[in-house]
Image (spheres, grey):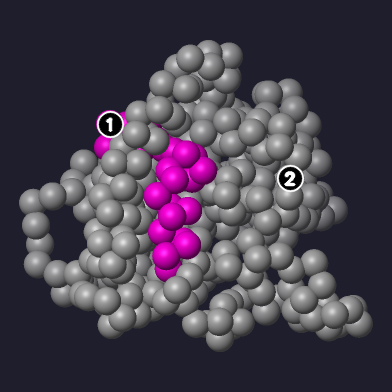
Amino acid sequence: AMTHTTAQPERSSRAATARPTVTLTGVQPTGDLHLGNYIGAIRPLADLAGDLTRDVYVFVADLHALNSRPDPAVLRERSRRLVAALLACGLDRPNVHVYRQSRVPAVAGMAALLNNVTAKGLLNRAHAYKAAVAANVAAGRDPDHGVNMGLYSYPVLMAADILALDADEVPVGADQAQHLEIAVDLAQQFSRSYRPGVLREPRALIAQTTATLPGLDGRKMSKSYGNAISLMAEPDDMRKQIRRIVTDSTPPAQPKDPDTCTLVALLRAFADPGTVAAVEERYRTGGIGYGEVKARLADAIDAHVAPMRNRYQRLLTDPAELDARLARGEQNACRRADRTLARTVVAMGL
């Protein structure tokens, strides 16, 4: 998932037009969203979608997920849960189109065409492939051990996601900047090989600040670290997870530094400013224990998340509504991608 907060688009050389700006992003169906995903990616995206001059396309990257060969039933369930969570977290708006990547065939078609203007050397330099090779070499294995073409050509499919939807802008953090650069590179190469103006060159929507939440152990919240707090957990489960947050042994009466405390970092993301200021003041002067702060944090998170959790659960128990929302998003994405693919096919002489 993305990791950004407020963002400003780079200046574009294209003249401003009356049509909406098309913003596109994708989310991997790797499991249930956690609080860090929400604060770092989903909430900022919902804020962007509040600008009705934008059309926001959000896809569940189920084709990308195939390179790790997940169990088909698990992949389907994770994809539906992710769609329900995205809609529940503020993206159920008329100008937001949520869709499954696999249900837009023009994306796969575009990837097949883009392969023909993609240099192998470019993919050799892609971060995910280089990391897999480095891990294999360090372990004494063949450099390409366990590498399938889904992993190797991941950047081409990512470029197809962006270019097929004719996107103006793509939110990028440090971990995804290269994918956008490759998409721009392939659009430019296509223009040189065939003709300009067929594929729109996307611009970056650059995060001015990056919001990352600490997890249970103080490190960045991540499923891979096993320190994540599930966004849609039931209230009792959420409180149990919050009680497990690691703190030091400073007694309540002793002053503490709020800027180094995981509890305060989480409180700042979810509580109202008055509550945060009061807790921070009591940290500096002394007189507050971690147990009290954990209880306040659990209350603040539950107040924020409860409406989203209720909406999420209603969507999961009403397959017809979830399917209807998906159908609208997927029909819209298909219409847009089909037009781009048709232009591309003609330009290539097919």
Mark 2 nearby-residue class (10 Å; few <14, some 14–19, many ≥20): few
> Residue 261: percent from the left, percent from the top?
68, 56
Quarter of the picture holding the C terminus: bottom left
Question: What is the secondary structure assignment of the residue under circle 2?
Answer: loop
- Residue at 32% x, 75% y is 190
- Given residues 3 and 101, the one toward you in this image is 101
> Residue 121: percent from the left, percent from the top?
56, 86
> Residue 259: percent from the left, percent from the top?
61, 61
Taking the view exactly as shown, the residue that stands out farthest to the bottom is 121
Q: Quadrant of residue 78?
A: top right
- In reply to whether residue 214 is colored magenta, the answer given is no
- In reply to whether residue 99 is colored magenta, the answer given is yes
- Residue at 41% x, 59% y is 110
- Seen in the image, is 261 located left or right of residue 103? right
Q: Which residue is the site of mark 2? A: 70
- Residue at 67% x, 79% y is 130
- Given residues 231 and 197, the one toward you in this image is 197
Which residues make up the magenta segment?
91-114
Q: Amino acid at mark 2?
A: Pro
Question: What is the secondary structure assignment of the residue under circle 1?
Answer: loop
Q: Which residue is the site of mark 1? A: 94
Rendered position, 204 above or below 285: below
- Residue at 35% x, 68% y is 204
Q: Quadrant of residue 171?
A: bottom left
> Residue 337: percent from the left, percent from the top?
33, 49
